[in-house]
Structure formats: structure tokens, C-alpha cells
Amino acid sequence: MNYRMTKEVIDLLEQFEIENTESYYPANISGFKEWLCDKSSFENKQKEEPYWEGKENGRTPESAISTLLVHVNRYAKTYSKSAISDSDFTTQEDFIYLINLKAFGKMTKMELIKKNIHDKPVGMLIITRLLKQGWIEQAESDIDKRNKIISISEKGKEALERQMKKIREATDIVAGNLTYHEKMELIRILNKLDRFHYPIFSRNIDSKDLIKTVYEEYSFKN
């Protein structure tokens, strides 16, 4: 047995546990492999720190990341608006709700709303709109009669299929000129951010307490 290699693996596992205190990665072998892949990729690239607007004036990388995410989201909404311009869809959320129902199957109203990262009032408006169009159906839950189970209807599938070509083209455009490997790296990074933010979002913390609560509970040191 190569004891030196075994010790190196154990040291790596220990480093993984230390660096993963915020649970950015699953605490299992899959999470360890993902962490190791990200770490190796970062170390092998050895790129110079990128430039971002305002950097020379002391603008932080966190500020640049937040702004760029907002920009990309707005670009995506513009392309989505174009994709549904000749359809009965009112907003991009309409077809995203249908896509989720088609992909993941029936679910409660709140499950559907949370999957789309919406507040309840906004989500209920979208669901009501989809019901009026006949694109979704609802039935009583077998587990809790107070809950309604939502599923996509045949009419909804047909409406979605008519627009899927343009929707796919819009998503292709959003990914822009990224190479395959850049897309894979971006997915890994965005998944990491999503795993951080979703549990916080799911707690429904009051807006006036949100920032204070998150800052007190989480450390943002590298």
C-alpha cells in the first residue's frame, strides 16, 4: 500500500472539511470530488485577476458580481420576451412554470412557486393566469385536502410545444459565446451560489430582518 498517497488523500479530506464549513458542497464523496475538481481547475488556470468596471476606484468583486448577474438576467428577459412575442404567453414566467410542471410532474401550488423563486402573491397570480388559459389543471391533494395539486394540461403542453423552438433559441443566445468548458464551469459556480441562497430564501425571513440575519449567521471570508 502506498501510505504516502493515503496520507495525502486524508490531508485533502481534512482540507475539504475545513474549507466546506458553509456547506457549499455536499458533505459526501460527490461533494469532495466536486470540490477537488474546482480546486484543481482554479490552481491549473493560474490566470491573472480579471478586470471589472470600477476596479481601479476600489469597487469590490462582490459589487461587480451582483451587477453582472442583474445585467445577464435582464438580457435573458429581453430574449424571452422576443420568444413569446407571437404567442398567448404574457410573461416568461408563464412558460417557465409550464416547463417545470412538464419536467418534474405535478406538485402543490407552493412547491411550484418556490421552485421558481417567487413570493406567494406573485406566484398565485401566475398560476391563476395559467388556469384561465386552461394550460394547467388542479385537483385536491390525497394527503391534505386543503392543498391543490397542479399539473400541466394537454392544452398547456401544446402551447408550450408551439414556442419551444424559439425558447430554445433564446436560451442558446443567453449562453452567448461561451465555450463548452466555460459553460460547465459557469454551471458549477451558479450551482454553488444557488445552494447557498436557496435555503435562506426558503426560510421566508422578513425583508427588514433578512440582511442582518444572514450577516450574523454566515461568514463571507474567503
Image (cartoon, rainbow, N blue to C red):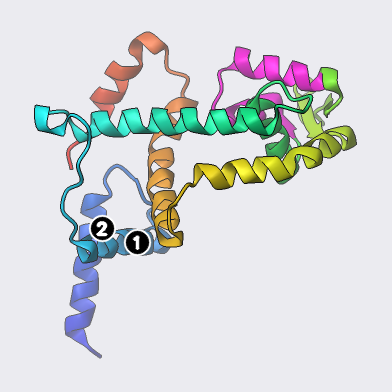
Left or right of residue 128: residue 70: left
Tell me if residue 123 is in the magenta stretch.
Answer: yes
Pick out the residue farthest to the top.
Answer: 208
Q: Residue at x 37, y 54 (%)?
A: 27
Q: Are marks 2 and 1 in contact (CB under 8 Å)?
A: yes
Q: Residue at x 11, y 28 (%)?
A: 58
Three-letter residue code for mark 1: Phe
Quadrant showing the N terminus: bottom left
Q: Which residues are magenta?
A: 107-131
Crowdedness of circle 1 by 10 Å Cα count: few (<14), some, many (20+)? some
- Residue 113 appears at what percent x and percent y? 62, 26
Task: Please tell me the numbered disc located at residue 1.
Answer: none
Q: Nearer the viewer, residue 150 or 62?
A: 62
- Residue 69 appears at what percent x and percent y? 39, 33
Residue occupied by mark 2: 16
Secondary-structure class at tag 2: helix
Q: Residue at x 61, y 15 (%)?
A: 122
Three-letter residue code for mark 2: Phe
Left or right of residue 101: residue 217: left
Q: Nearer the viewer, residue 178 or 153?
A: 178
Tell me if residue 171 is in the magenta stretch.
Answer: no
